[in-house]
Amino acid sequence: MKTDKRALSVYIHIPFCIRKCLYCDFLSAPATDEMRTRYLKCLSSEIERESHKYCAYKVRTVFVGGGTPSLLSGNEMKQLLECVKLNYDVAEDAEITAEVNPGTVNLRKLEGYYEAGINRLSIGLQSADNKELQCLGRIHSYEEFLQTYENAVKTGFNNINIDLMSAIPGQTVESYQKTLKAVLSLNPSPTHISAYSLILEEGTPFGDNPPELPDEETDREMYKITDEMLKDSGYHRYEISNYAKEGYECIHNKVYWKRGDYVGFGIGAASLVDNVRFHNIADIEEYMGQLEKYKEISLPELHLKEDIQSLSVEEQMEEYMFLGLRLTEGISEKDFFETFQKSIHEVYPGLIAKLKKQGLIICEPEDENGNRIKLSDFGLDVSNVVMAEFLLTE
């Protein structure tokens, strides 16, 4: 009897950048051509070696992230994706995304990505103001972004996300509005927009020497303007920081928020499979050294993974709530019960009623088996406070 395979998402980490942005805490660094060639060979080896574990899965999404994946040539991207398709059961209609930074791609390279099977681009713009881009340590100008976008459309890409950032040092409500207007005036307009506030992370130049940021009131005004302008332009907000035109929500990222199975390849890449979380080692020399030493697929397991954690039921419940509530569709009481064989109200006695009374959540009737629980507009504004309420473990 034939049964449908379980869905799997694949993340591939390309850790190389021309120069690291001042706010970035992602695992990335500059690299020589020789280092990049070595890493890609090892990455393909890891992808191949791990494939036997995922025979029962069908890959529905692939996301090539970084770093700056668009430092790869069209041929390198093609070889990488061919390795995935050769070793995994990839759905014909799989969403395959590559992150792209302006200033690192030209028309020819984008044509190579398109031919390689990339069908969704995520372009890191951040701001349409060149002074703000310079402040962030970005390597590109707004004009280079426009050229990248024009080339992407010319190539045939019709599913394009634009990353935007607010609360940048020196940014005003007026300059942020100009960025939004500039993006919305693109022809054709992007199908998806991710809009985040700048966060100062430890270990980054901004984190170590904090710049002066717009005050909290200005930040909240930018947040409100984003929601209003994008909704007026035909985008619907489906996650706290993500907006899409109808039919263009990011399938890959929704897997994260809905706790689907995903596996990460490359240094530092995170995975969640069968309620087990783990990630790869972050040291690139150790990563490559192991894969170069043990080239035979039949050799014993390598020690690439660390922090392997089998999630307890309580931890699964926590994640179900504070990841699921990031989505504007919220979570289903019925699904929660079917997943854990306990009702939300049994696990969190009195909490739903309290948060509803405080105006932080709304409960909409779904069917006779319960409600859908969603963050209210106020709850979205203070989402971190709401999420903390659903912690069961210390």
Image (cartoon, helix red, strand yellow):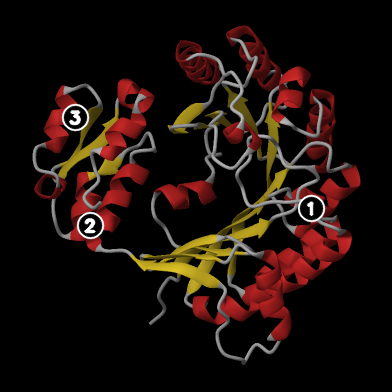
Q: Tell me which amino acid carries mark 1.
A: Tyr
Q: Residue at x 25, y 46 (%)?
A: 391
Q: Residue furthest bottom?
A: 298
Q: Earlier in the sequence, mark 1 or mark 3?
A: 1
Decide: marks 1, 3 in contact (CB < 8 A)? no
Give the SS element for disc 3. Answer: helix
Q: From the viewer's perspective, is 285 left or right of 147?
A: left
- Kind of residue at disc 2: Glu
Disc 2 crowd, CA 10 A, few/some/many (<14, 14-19, 20+): some
User: Which quadrant is home to the N terminus?
Assistant: bottom left
Q: Residue furthest top?
A: 174
Q: Is residue 187 visible?
A: no
Q: Could you say which quadrant of the image residue 291 lies in?
A: bottom right
What type is the residue that disc 3 sits on?
Leu
Q: Which labelled disc corresponds to residue 355?
A: 3
* For residue 277, above or below residue 16: below
